[in-house]
Amino acid sequence: MSSKDQQTYPLPELSAFTRPFWEGCQNKELKIAVCGQCSHRFMPGVPNCPKCWSADFSLQAVSGRGEVFSFAVYRRTYHPAIPAPYVVALIQLEEGPRLVSNIVECAFEKIHIGMQLEVCFQEEDGFMLPRFRPLETPPVDTN
Ligand SMILES: [Zn+2]
């Protein structure tokens, strides 16, 4: 790794399996994979459905809403292009799959398990990354 690489935000390397997901992000669309055999919904980036192993699946855009399943505040800088502090979270999407992302636009002390979130796309070195922020208008419970 050269010193230039160390200053550049570490972006994903695209493969045949990850490219459709990341291309969706460039258009500000969050996509999940839906199995054509068993209807299981999962995060793209793998060649087969993790439930039935079928390679028959397609990507669908989702709402971008979810909630905090777990999170950690990183208070140490591990990469020079990503200065601490920042939040890494496991986010449970409304549609089922979980993904790892950052929570932004929120004071750390307000983040909690179950907090309602929405996706927002932020550019790093010309590449759009999905991150999550507090949902501005929580859904009204009519029950
Ligand atoms: Zn399946």
Image: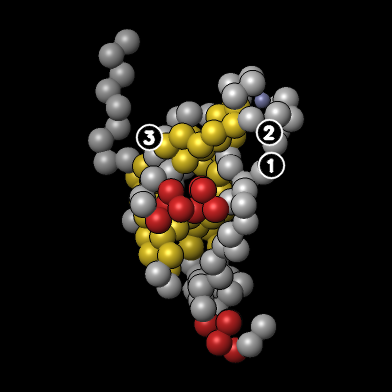
Query: Does the residue at mark 3 contact the one at mark 2 (Cβ under 8 Å)?
Result: no
Residue 134: quadrant of the picture: top left
Q: Residue at x 37, y 42 (%)?
A: 118
The alpha-carbon separation of the residues under discs 3 and 2 comes to 24 Å
Residue 47 or 97: which is nearer the viewer? 47
Three-letter code, disc 3? Ser
Query: Secondary structure beneath disc 1?
Result: loop
Q: Mark 3, residues whose alpha carbon is within 10 Å: few (<14), some, or many (≥20)?
A: few
Q: Which residue occupies the extreme bottom position in the image?
A: 3
Q: Is residue 110 visible?
A: no
Q: Which mark is residue 47?
A: 1
Answer left or right for 57 relative to 110.
right
Q: Mark 1, residues whose alpha carbon is within 10 Å: few (<14), some, or many (≥20)?
A: some
Query: Secondary structure beneath disc 2?
Result: loop
Three-letter code, disc 1? Pro
Residue 74 or 118: which is nearer the viewer? 118
Q: Is residue 84 visible?
A: yes
Q: Mark 2, residues whose alpha carbon is within 10 Å: few (<14), some, or many (≥20)?
A: some
The quadrant the N terminus occupies is: bottom right
Q: Position of residue 10 (x, y in %)?
A: 56, 70
Q: How is the image coloured?
A: secondary structure
Viewer-nearest of labels 3 and 2? Answer: 2
Q: Which mark is residue 55?
A: 2
Three-letter code, disc 2? Ala
Please name the residue that numbered disc 3 is placed on. Answer: 63
Q: Residue at x 51, y 41 (%)?
A: 91
Residue 56: quadrant of the picture: top right
Q: Residue at x 42, y 52 (%)?
A: 25
Q: Earlier in the sequence, mark 2 or mark 1?
A: 1
Answer left or right for 102 relative to 16.
left
